[in-house]
Amino acid sequence: MDPTATTGIPAPTFFTHVDRALASRRARSLARTLTDPTYTIDRDFASNDYLGLAHSPALASAIHAATVAASSADGTAPQPHGATGSRLLSGHTPRASALEARLARLHGAEAALLFNSGYAANLAVLATLPQPGDLIVLDEFVHASVWDGVRLGVGRKPNRAPRHITVPHADVSAVRDVIVAERERELADGVARPCSIFIAVEAVYSMDGTVAPLRELVGMIEELGDVNVHLIVDEAHSSGAMGLNGAGLVCELGLEEKIPFRLHTFGKGIGCHGAVFLCSAAVRDFLINYARPLVYSTMMPTSALIAIECAYTFLEEHADQLQRDLQLRIATFSSACSRYPSLDLVPSTTHIQGIRVAGGNAAVVRIARDLREQGWYTLPIRAPTVPRGAERIQAIMLYAQHPATKQHLFNDVLAEVMLKFVSIEKMTLTLLVATQSLLDVHEILGRDVLNGRSELKSTRLRLGLAAKNYCVNGDQKDVLVPMRSLIGMLKALDFMDPDENGNKSRDRWLASQFFDLHPWLCGQLYYMLLQLATDTIFSPESPHRLLM
Ligand SMILES: Cc1ncc(COP(=O)(O)O)c(C=O)c1O
């Protein structure tokens, strides 16, 4: 039936909704798009290939050789290249069980269960293990897949769902408080059987690179003496990158026996695809029986199992060196950044690093895009993935293993990236000429520009307004026009000394800073201007406010 027939007003169709939703995302700089990779491997600062295994030619040949060997295994029927069914139906192979036994040994666990991805594993674990009445305690920064697992569990038993509560990031005492309060409530209510409490954390957090306080959590649970409290540690970002033979953080800390529930994913540091959940044999059986993402999904194919086997064999030989190289890169990055105090680094000691950028989602999207257009693979991390005001460019220390990233080459790469930020620093310095007090100008240039005082003030005002306009309209012209007038003003002030040939070299340098810079700096300009505008216009303490 025609929806306009009764009312005369065209009803919004599904497609209208789609268009509106997408337009709204674009307007908020939240649109997701699929982009073909344009970066070269040595310029990757954003993927999860922490040890370079996904790009390793040596590992690729090992996988190829093992695949050929498997398909021509003597006397046996050729392996199908597809798994042909769920693991519970035709998808199971002895190869999968052998891999699980090997992974259980490696990680010091009683048993292991493969999943098609970390996402599927978290869905399965969080939706299946907690029972009605149980309590799930979530670190506020846990991955979306954990949240979705909780939702799936709640959705399946809406009336008798497990409960969940969020605690501040890495706050052990907050977790303790929740446990104590729950037990006190049970006591007061005369509950016959205390509920199970599951605490979900990540070993290394994907956005901030922080390391979970695992020792403290284990110590706190032991101190409470509560055997019905279970830690679930998602090691997605520590698999491969930490621990002996890449076994992860829990193994590195020697906590295998204290933390039996662990998730390792193969799509990041292991360079493959899939995941494994470590647990007791009984819990493994329980998941095989009840975990819907396992039961109702086709098993990963033999080729994926072979790739994972080869990656772990590769790590047995190379993990130590690769991890040391990774640590070196983290140290190099930190020390390179420390030379530029204006860089707002996310405090992290791991391979996941970030540079915070003022100016919100629009700024961070623009900067990352411009960097990518130049071949630097960086990603914007936007709000609400991170809290508003903490938007950032993610910088992941990669390619410990790729030949093109020997330490000195990595330094070169880093230097090149840093140079761009240094350019920003220089620009900040130059902007200071126009925006800080005359004392600053004096110090920075060592010149007396008092004559230009009134022009400096009006330029500062124009810059501030331009930044605000830019913020609202996102038009780079808003920024560039006052920048040009700033240059003009500086030229008019004629504060540059000619060099021995009579050229005003610093003048040229300045001009090149503004006009010849690569376009991506416009985004940076925007945020600096925004900061300056905010400082000068809105901050009541700012001495510059008086000068406006
Ligand atoms: C902490 C964490 N857990 C789980 C996953 C999901 O793993 P997979 O990519 O294998 O689905 C991710 C992926 O980004 C993650 O960051």
Image (tube, rainbow, N blue to C red):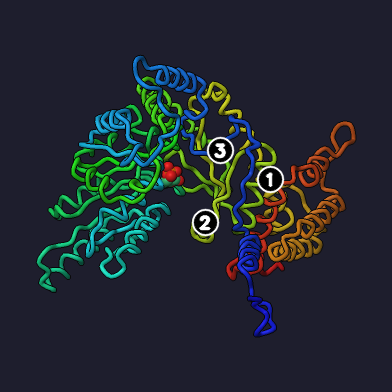
The residue where tag 3 is placed is 45
| N-term mark: 3 or 2 | 3
* Type of the residue with mark 2: Ala
| N-term mark: 1 or 3 | 3
The residue where tag 1 is placed is 370
> In front: mark 3 or mark 2?
3
Image quadrant, ligand 1: top left
Gap in Å between the C-alphas at discs 1 and 2? 20 Å
Name the foreground residue: 46 vs 472.
46
Tell me: residue 538, above or below residue 142: below
Gap in Å between the C-alphas at discs 1 and 3? 14 Å
The residue where tag 2 is placed is 390
Label 1 crowd bin: few (<14), some (14–19), many (20+), radius 10 Å: many
Count of marks overlaid on the render: 3
Q: Please identify the quarter of the rendering in which residue 250 is found.
A: top left
Most extreme residue toward the bottom, as rendered?
Answer: 7
Residue 413 appears at what percent x and percent y? 60, 31
| N-term mark: 1 or 2 | 1
Name the foreground residue: 96 vs 267.
96
Tell me: residue 321, above or below residue 346: above
Residue drawn 79% across and 42% down? 516
Where disc 2 sits, the SS reads loop
Tell me: residue 32, above or below residue 326: below
* Type of the residue with mark 3: Phe
Residue 452 appears at what percent x and percent y? 81, 58
Where disc 3 sits, the SS reads loop
